[in-house]
Amino acid sequence: MTMLDSSTSSDVLATRYQRSVADYWNQEKAPVNIRLGEVSGTFHHHYGIGEVDWSVLDGDEAGREERIIKELHRLEGAQAEYLLDQLGELGPDDRILDAGSGRGGTSFLANLRFGCQVDGISISEEQVKFADNQARERGVADRVAFHFRNMLHNGFPDATFRSVWNNESTMYVDLHKLFAEHARVLRPGGRYVTITGCYNDVHGRQPSRAVSQIDAHYICDIHPRSEYFAAMSANGLVPISVVDLTAATIPYWELRAKAAVASGIEDAFLTAYREGSFHYLMIAADKA
Ligand code: GPP
Ligand code: MG
């Protein structure tokens, strides 16, 4: 956290709901996140994509769980790299924003790839501390900074960022408020990218049972697919690319369901994706 961030909890956390989400993340230490992060020292809070190397299940029983953990971590790294692929041409002079930055994983990978200045924001003070420590340990604290701030009122001046992203963090906030704030801090022509889980409102106006189970597990509020486009359009964010990553993420969940570090939410994701009530989507848009 920088010296400029003297915000108190009541400045940042505007509602009781936000406080309960912050409480969840302040105490979160799930092995499915910590053990995976320890594989490379890059800690993610998102899921994975790509083909699974199923040979990790073969061979000696003693090393099996460690092989699964490494493979899940590899797939989560691939997801973050895929998100970065969508950010467009960036150079060391650009500044970019990770909205809902967790323990900092995607922010560090972005800095490694582009060399640019990255700001990460989170409403969890513990996550901000963790990510800040990592920035110091990695020797990039002058280029990657984490702030205890709210993505709905982020405190940065207008037109600060060349790119802004949410890596699985939009389901905690109102999309209209979020995209208004992103549009404010993006430079004209700047790129917004999200990877998200959204429910399929072509099936009906309410989320399915499996999607509701996911909401209850994380205390989040998964949005319908249509709302992303309505909220972007209302805020001058013009979609350039939409990719359905559902088929690419199912293998990750199949492998995770076999891991001792599984959290218990795996079957709900697999059911929701397989029945078509839920999609894993990448959406990229440009600020008009
Ligand atoms: C957390 O990742 C991601 C969310 C809580 C957002 C919910 C995402 C959807 C696509 C609905 P995590 O790595 O902390 O979760 P887990 O502990 O399950 O690995
Ligand atoms: Mg995780």
Image: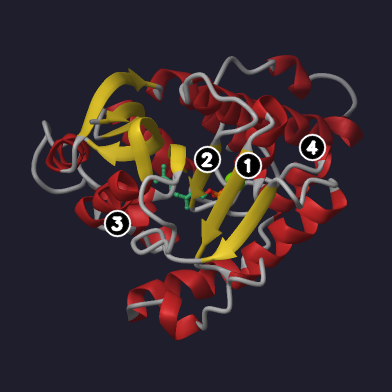
- Residue 22 got which mark? none
- Could you tell me the amino acid type at mark 2? Ile
Judged left or right of residue 151, residue 142 is right
Label 2 or label 1, whichever comes before in sequence order = 2
Say above or below: 276 vs 14. above
Q: Secondary structure at mark 2?
A: strand
Report the mark closest to the observer, 2 or 4: 2
Report the mark closest to the observer, 4 or 1: 1
CA distance separating discs 2 and 3: 26 Å
Q: Quadrant of the C terminus?
A: top left
Report the mark closest to the observer, 3 or 4: 3
Q: Position of residue 1 (x, y in %)?
A: 66, 66
Q: Which residue is mark 4?
A: 65
Q: Which residue is mark 2?
A: 96
Mark 2 and mark 4 in contact? Answer it, CB < 8 Å.
no
What residue is at 40 percent from the left and 22 percent from the top? 245
CA distance separating discs 3 and 1: 31 Å
Q: Is residue 167 visible?
A: no
What residue is at 61 percent from the left and 24 percent from the top? 78
Judged left or right of residue 207, residue 159 is right
How many residues crowd around disc 3 within 10 Å: few (fewer than 14), some, or many (20 or more)? some
Q: Which residue is mark 3?
A: 221
Mark 3 and mark 1 in contact? Answer it, CB < 8 Å.
no
Label 2 or label 3, whichever comes before in sequence order = 2
Q: Secondary structure at mark 3?
A: loop
Q: Report which quarter residue 164 is drawn in.
A: top left
Say above or below: 129 vs 146. below
CA distance separating discs 2 and 1: 6 Å
Q: Secondary structure at mark 4?
A: helix
CA distance separating discs 2 and 4: 36 Å
What residue is at 39 percent from the left and 24 percent from the top? 246
Q: Which residue is mark 1?
A: 117
